[in-house]
Structures are given as structure tokens and as C-alpha cells.
Amino acid sequence: MAEVKNAFIKSKMNRDLDARLIPSGEYREAFNAQISRSEGDDVGALENILGNSIVPSGVFEDGQSYADNLTAIGYTVDERSNCIYVFLTDGTRSSNSDAYVKSGDGSNHFIYQYDVATTTATKLVEGPFLNFSKNFPIYGVNLIENLLFFTDNFNQPRKINIDKAISSSGYYYNEDQISVSKYSPWQPIDLYQEITADRVAANPLLTAAQGEYDSSMRDVVSKFLPNGGTATVSVAATSSTAIDISNINIPFYQRTQTTSDNVPQVGMTVGVIGFSGGKLRGPIVDTGAKVSSTGYAAGVVNLDNPITVDVDDQLVFNFNHYYNDSYAGDSRFLEDKFGAGRFSSFADKLAGGSPQGAAGLAFGRDLGLEGDRLNQFASVIANDRDLYNQMALTNFMKQREIDELSYDTQRGLPTGGGNRTPAPADPITAAYNPADNPYGSFGIGNFV
């Protein structure tokens, strides 16, 4: 028997023609039917529109005295997650001249997520600060990824992060959090902070500085300061001030007391990292000792206080108080972030095209500079012929020797009454022995 099929791809109802004359793709009449969208692979087929279902009673604020007085003043549907977002309130304010209701009747406002598949409702936000009103329905609702934007023409436009609201009950609790318009900062950010008891508990190396202030931008991956270094304990010692060491690595050759390079200098602080399980483990422990006046000689460093160490422990001279042995981030984070600025990738560019810049790189590396500071120094040298000539005439560039490098930064700190008195920062300077450097009376000068 012949079978007649009609695909209603025109999606057009035609009641003008006789039913026997309706062309293919059109239909005479339909109720609760849709053609433009199909639930299956039979696109163009005539099918029933999905109907509505009543939400079970007690889903929203069940048992609360105000539950029966709540009205849905707005909603939006997320078809991807099959969820409905509903705005509920018992508020009745008609204008801003009406008194703001902080509690009781008229102060109950909610934003809910209702999952159609599981028939469960999740409270996202609640509180008087929502300030909804039955007199101001919410028609402007947009869902962009996990951000729900809404406005009721009564309050300022708002938004919430659905994921945060679900993961943390009570995450939103005031207007500042949900308002799209944010307050501008009333003062610049402070790049320093107080060394509190909590910070000392987390990092005992800061004990002596408790109550003082330090920069909030820190190097946590370098074991020692630019004028420090490391050495390996070669003979175990118990409560001894004379420690046998080897594998000395002090990249910045101070030579303030000795006639040899790469040796511990008098006054250097001493920390220790323990060796166990075939590797160095743990944070730097402050021994409380310093290199004594007798300094270093014949593979032995003399300290002003006795310490106890094992073989293969590592001594760290002029150790970095902020060193974090468990830091899992990117050690070149700041360099990468600031690399797009004035001194971006200068090491690569200068080494291949600028003799002055290449010389500045070599000079800066011997100073112990790294990353952005090294690039910045090389940039100044590359762009200042007089400065380059001064550098080239120093004994440092002739013999690769240096006497002193000073890193010292001062900050404006809080004073009485909460006022801050800004103080000019001491820039990084490179100083040389005037006896050896014809320009030592004024040095190379500031390079930041």
C-alpha cells in the first residue's frame, strides 16, 4: 500500500486553501505542536511541544512564615544545564522614598537555581540587601557562562557568580559584592606589609623583624642574597665554631677582607639546609651564627657561635629570609610578567646586536643581577656611551673583580595616627674602590 509522507519543513500553517489542496511542507491546523525544533533526528517532523509541570510545594523556603507570601518577580532558563533561575521576594517597596526594610516582612529576598531534571532547588543568594520588590519585576536577565546578570529598574545592575554561590553558602552578603558598578579605590595599593606574629609563625626566619614592615614583592626561590652563597659541610661537627666546608659557591666575589675570591666573608649570616635521603631537604634554618673575625682559611670557616651540622648539609651565607623550599610556582614569574615592557627580552636582543649591551650583560651577571634587573642594567649601558666607557675603564671589566654591591630600598611606612610619610627609595648602586677605578669618586651611577 502506498505511504504518503509530508515533511513540514516550511513550518507554515495554511487555512486559506482547502485541506485537499495544501501543498507539501505546510499544514492546516495544529495545537501544542512545533516544527522548527526537533527532539530527535527527524528534523521537519510535526511533534508535540514539551509541556509544563508544577514545582512541588515546599521547594522554596519551606516552613518559613513568609513562604506563602513570596512571589517570583523574574526568571531565566539555562537550556544547557536544564536549570531555571528564579528571583523571589515578599518586598513591596514602590519607590526609593519608601523605607528600606532590614528585617521581618518585606525583607525576604532570594535567588534560587532549580534543576528540572532532579527537581531540586539550590539557594544561591539571600538577604535584605537584594532589596527586591514585587512592584519592580526583573525582566533584564542574562546568563553568560557562569555569570548571572540581572536588573529590576529599581536597584543598580547586578551580577553573581553561580559557581561561587553554589560552592559556598552565604558567599554573597552585601551590595558591594553583587553590584556591576564597583567603587574606585580610594588610595593606591600598598606594596609593603607588617611582619606580624602569624607571619613569624609561618616563617621563623622573620622572628627578629617582627613588628617591622617589608615589601610584599619577594624572591622566594633564591637561597641567598646577591652578596651571599653556599658551601657543603665536609666533616660533621657538634657545637663547633670551626666548620670544614667544600664546594664553595659565592658568585658575588666580595673580597672585602681576604685576597681570595669565592670565600665566606666576615659578618655573613649562616643558615643551614639539612641533607637526608640523598638530597637537600627542608627550609633554611637560622643557626644564629655569623662568620667570625677569623673568617675563612684552608677549607674551614670560623663562626662566632657554635653550631651542629652533618656531612653534606649545606651552609647558606647571607641567606634569603623569604626562601621557600616548597614553592611550586614559576621562579621566573616576575621576569615573564614584566618582560613585555621597556626591557623585554633584552638579554637575547643585546647579545646578538649590541656590543655595549653584551658587555653590560656580562658586567651585570658578575654583579649578581638576574632577570629584569639584569636586562634593565644592560639597557642603560647599551644606551649611554659615557656610562659604557666608565664601565669599560674599571678594573672590574679588566680583571672581572668587584668590591661591593649594595641593594637597599627604603619605603614610606605608617607613622602615628595612621599617616604615611613617603621616603625616597635608595636606588641600586654599584660602588668601586676609588684607588682602582678612575671614576670611583662618583661610581657608575644609578641604573634604576
Image (spheres, rainbow, N blue to C red):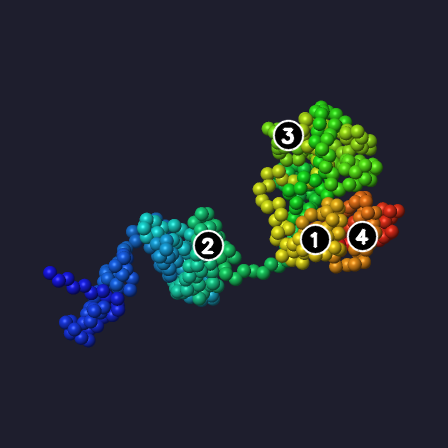
Which numbered marker is on residue 391? 4
Sequence-first disc among 3 and 2: 2
User: For the residue carrying disc 4, how many other residues have a C-alpha within 10 Å: few (<14), some (14-19), or many (20+)?
Assistant: many
Q: Is 296 left or right of 223, judged from the image as shown?
A: right
Residue carrying label 2: 161
Residue at the image point whose x is 86% and y is 49% from the top? 437
Sequence-first disc among 2 and 4: 2
Q: Quadrant of residue 295?
A: top right
Residue carrying label 3: 275
Sequence-first disc among 1 and 3: 3
Residue carrying label 1: 351
Callout 2 amino acid? Asn
CB under 8 Å between callouts 1 and 3? Answer: no
CB under 8 Å between callouts 2 and 4? Answer: no
Callout 3 amino acid? Phe
Residue at the image point whose x is 73% and y is 52% from the top? 358
Q: Is residue 380 visible?
A: no
**Looking at the image, which is closer to me, 74 or 94?**
74
Q: Quadrant of residue 134?
A: bottom left
Marks 2 and 1 sit apart, C-alpha to C-alpha, by 48 Å
**Looking at the image, which is closer to me, 172 or 41?**
41
